[in-house]
Amino acid sequence: MTHVVVDPITRIEGHLRIEAEVEGGKVTQAWSSSTMFRGVELILEGRDPRDAWAFTQRICGVCTTVHAIASIRAVEHAIGVTPPPNARLLRNLIIAAQNVHDHVIHFYHLQALDWVDIVSALSADPAKTAKLAQSLSDWPLSSTAYFSDVRNRVKAFVERGQLGIFANAYWGHPAYRLPPEANLMALAHYLEALDFQRRFIKIHAILGGKNPHLQSFLVGGMATPVDPDAQASLNLGTIAELRKLVAEGVDFVSRVYVPDVLAIASFYKDWFSIGSGVSNYLSYGDFPMDDSPHPVLYIPSGVIHAQDLTQIASVDQTKIAEYVTHSWYDYTVGNDAGLNPYHGETNPNFTGPKPPFKRLNVEEKYSWLKSPRYDGAPMQVGPLARMLVAYGLNRPTRAKTLIAAALKQLDAPPSALFSTLGRIAARAIEAQVLVESMGMWVEGLADQMARRDYRIQDTSHWHPSTWPKDCFGAGFHEAPRGALGHWVHIRDGKIAKYQCVVPSTWNAGPRDAHGQPGPYEASLEGTPVAKPDQPLEILRTVHSFDPCMACGVHVVDATKRELARVRVS
Amino acid sequence: MAQTRLMRELERQGISRREFLTFCASMAAVLGMPKSASATIARAIETEERPILVWLEFQDCAGNTESFLRAGHPTVADLILDTISLNYHETLMAAAGTQAEDALESTVAKHKGKYIALVEGSIPADADSGYCMVGGRSALDIAREVCGNAAATVAVGTCATFGGLPAARPNPTRALSVADAVPGVKNLIHLSACPANAENITALIVYYLTVKRWPPLDQYRRPLFAYGTLIHDACERRAHFDSGQFVEEWGDEAHRHGYCLYRMGCKGPATSQNCPIVQWNSHTNWPIGCGHPCLGCAEPNFWDVMTPFYERLPNVAGVSASRWLDPVGLTASGAVAAAAVIHGIGEVRRYRRGHHRPPEDKGHADENKHESDSNEESRK
C-alpha cells in the first residue's frame, strides 16, 4: 500500500490537498483537505447588508459573480424586495456569461493538460491534424498552415529551454492516450481559448464595468442604466455589441469546445466508468424566466437519489445541514451535530499538524471545509447535477436534446454520465445550452427598451428604514461549480449573521459524523493510479469537479464576538 | 541573436512589426512616458533574456490571476507571456504536488537573487495557525523564503498590498500584507486594487524590462503612472460634479445620462488609480462608466475606511468630517456650491497626498515619497 499526497493540487482556484491510499494500482481511500481560511462571514457581521455582495464577491475571483448574486438575492429575500424585469435580464446575462466563460477556461486551461500531452503534440503531422479537426467541425481556423504554425511556435518555445508553466509535468505518462494529432489540435485550442475568454468576457465589462469583480450589483436591482436614448446607458449600440459577442460565444462553444470534448472523450471511454462516487445530485435551479415570486427556472431545480433519474424530488432548504466532525471548527452543540445554515456556527479551531508537515491525521479533523448534507446524504453539485435534473425531468429541453446527441455520438448509455468523463461532458453541454440562451435575454432587454421600461432597481426599498427590524433571507444560485446558497439575518439594518454553503463545500468536503465521504473522496475510490509518484489520474477525477477552494471554505463565526462598529452618520 | 529570435517569433505569430510598435506605443502611454519612449521599450523587449517570475497565491481569491489573463492587446500580450518565464503559478502550471514544489524550489535555488516574485493574497501572521498552507508549509514560511531570495517582489492586488479583505475588521486570521509579513523584503512594489488592472501589471513588467529599475512610486510604494491621479480628477463625469448635477436615485434620468455618482457613495474623490484612463478589459468600460460608484478598492483598508459603500464621502469610517466641508454645501446650487466643491476636493487631495494619515494605516510614511530610487531596500 502506498500513501500518496498531492499538495498543491494545481490548476484550480485556491488551496487543496489530496491524500490517498493506493493498493493494486487503484485508490482505495482518499481524503480531501482545504488548507486556507479567511473568515469572510465574520467580517460581514455588523455591516450594511447592501455592501455584502462586494465582500462575498471577493470569496472568489474565478467565479467572480456568483457570491454577489447569491448575496443580493439573500438580502432581497430578507427585506422583501423584487428586482424589476431589466435587472432580472441583466443578471441572467451576467450569470450565463460567467458559466460559459468559466467552463471554457476550466476545460482548456485547468483540465485539458490531464488528458493532452503537449510534448507529443510536437511530433504531430499538421496536415493530419487539419483533417482530424475538419472532421469534427467547420471551424475556419482548422487548416494545415494554422496547425503547422502552432506546432512550430510551441517547438521554438520548448527548444529555448525555459518551459515556464509547462515544466515538470507528467508528459509521457502512460495514461496519456491521444494520438499526436489530437494533442496538437487541443494545444492549438488551448491558445485560442486564451484569446476567446478575453474577448467574450467583454460582456461583463459592458454590463458590470469590469471583470474580474464586476461592480454593477445592487440590492433590489442593478446599477447599469437602460435607456435607448442615452449615451451613458445600455442602448441600442450596446445591444448590437452584446449580440456580436454572444454570437462569437455560440460559435466557439459549438464549433470548438463541445467537439473537442467529445473527440477527446472518444479516446478515453474507460473513464465513463471511473469516478462515479456519490450517487446523489442536487440543483437549486437558476435563470428566472418571469418576475413572479416563484418563477419558472430555465435551468431546473431538483434532487436525485441513488442515480434514479425517474424520480426527481423538489428541493427543501430545511433539509440542508452542515457537519464539522472532520473540519477545523467547533460547534457549541457538539461536534457530531448537523446544523441548518440559519442556525449555523463556525468557530475556527485548527487542530491539524504544525507546519511543515508530511501527513494529516485523517482520523481527526483534517479540512477547513465543512461537510454539508441533504437529508443526511452527501450530494454532488455542478453542471452534471444540473444536466441530470434537466435530462430526467419529463419535459423537452435543449439540455435533453444535446445530452442525447452526445451519448449517441459516443455510443454510450445514460449511465455513462455518472463518471469523471460525465462531469466533463456535462459541463461542455451546459456551456452550449447557456450560450445559446443568452440571445433570448439580450432580445428581452431590447424589448424592454421598445416598451420604454427603464426601471433597473426597486428604489422604494433602498433605505434601511423601509426594512423590517428583524428579518431572515436565503439566496440561491447555480454557480459554474454548482449549488450555492447564502443565508442572512438582518437586525436593525445591519448584518447579524451570515452563512454561505458553497458548491466546493458540497463536493470537496470531508467525511461527516457517520463517516460518509464527500464527493471528491468517494469519486477517487477505485480511480486507477499507474505511477504513484506521478498521480495523473487523481488529478483527472479531482479536476473533473472544477475545484474552487477559496469558495468552499466556510468562513463564519456566528455570534458573540464584538465587532468594531462601522460609523454611519 | 536574441533580436532575430524575436523577429522570427513575431512573424510566426502573424504579428507585423507595425503592430508590435503600436503595442509598445500603447504601453508607453499607459506608463505616462513620451511617445519617443516606445522605441526604447521595443528595444528592451527585443533584446532581453526572458526574466524569471514566480507567482505565489496565499489568502487570495485568484482575482488578480484572472485579471492577468485578461491582459489586452491579446496577441502581443501573448508575446509578453512568452517574453517572461513563469516558473511557478499554481492556477496555471501543468505540474502538481511534489513536481510543482520542485519547480519552485529549484527556481529559488538556481536563480537566487535574480527572479521576480509576484504575490497575490494576504499572509496569516502566525505560521502555526493553519490558516494558509501549501504543500504542508505555512504561507509565512514560503513567503520568507521566496520573497527573501527574489531580486524584487510585486504585491499584486489589495490583499497582498494592504492586507485587503482578510484583514478587514475584525481580521479573524491576523492577515498581513507582504510588507508587514516579510519585513525588509528587497525592492517591493505595490499594485493595489481589487483586482489589480491587467494593463498595469503588464505595464509594470515592461517598465522593468525597459529601464531595469522600478518606476517612481507614491507613499504607498505604488507606481505613479498608475496611482498618481485621483479617479475624481480624470473622471468622465467630473464636469457634472463641478456643475452640481448628481444622480439621486438608481435609474433616474440623471443616472441614465451619466451624471455624477458622488451622492450615491462614489469614492472616486478619495481614490487614486488610472481606471478612468486605462479602463478595463481592453478599454471596454469601468465601474463608474457602467453606472456604479467607485468603491475605493485601491486604497489602504478600503473595506473598513470606505464603507458603508453607499454612504457619500465623508460619511464613512475612514474620512474625518472635519477635513471636509459640510456635504450640505454640495446640495446648494450655483457659484457658492462650486466654490465649496473646489475647496472640498482640495481637502481630499491633501488627504490623499499623505498630509493626513488615514487612521488605520500602520505607515509606510517614511518610505520613498514620490521618489524613483526604488531599487534600494524598502524596509530596513
Image: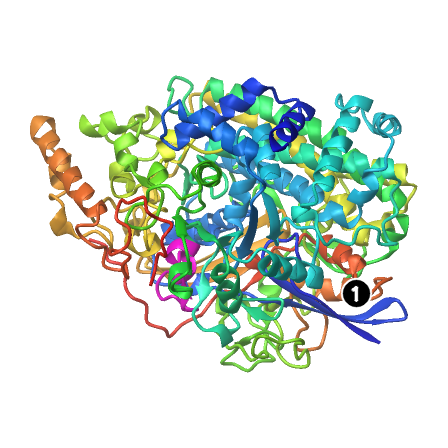
Image spot of residue A297 (x, y percent): 62, 41
> On the rendered image, what quadrant is the N terminus of chain A found in?
bottom right
Q: Which residues are magenta?
A: B160-176
Q: Taking A24 as reference, is B208 left or right? A: left
**Label 1 packing within 10 angstroms: few (<14), some (14-19), many (20+):** some
Q: Is residue B203 visible?
A: yes
Amino acid at dot 1: Asp
The reply to whether the magenta stretch includes residue A99 is: no
Residue A459 in the image: above or below residue A73: above
What residue is drawn where x is 82% and y is 39%? A121
Q: Taking A523 as reference, is B190 left or right? A: left
Q: Which residue is mark 1?
A: A533
Closer to the camera in the image, B36 or B60: B36
What residue is drawn where x is 21% and y is 49%? B354
For residue A541, what is the image quadrant? Answer: bottom right
Image spot of residue B222 (x, y percent): 35, 46
Closer to the camera in the image, A445 or A273: A273
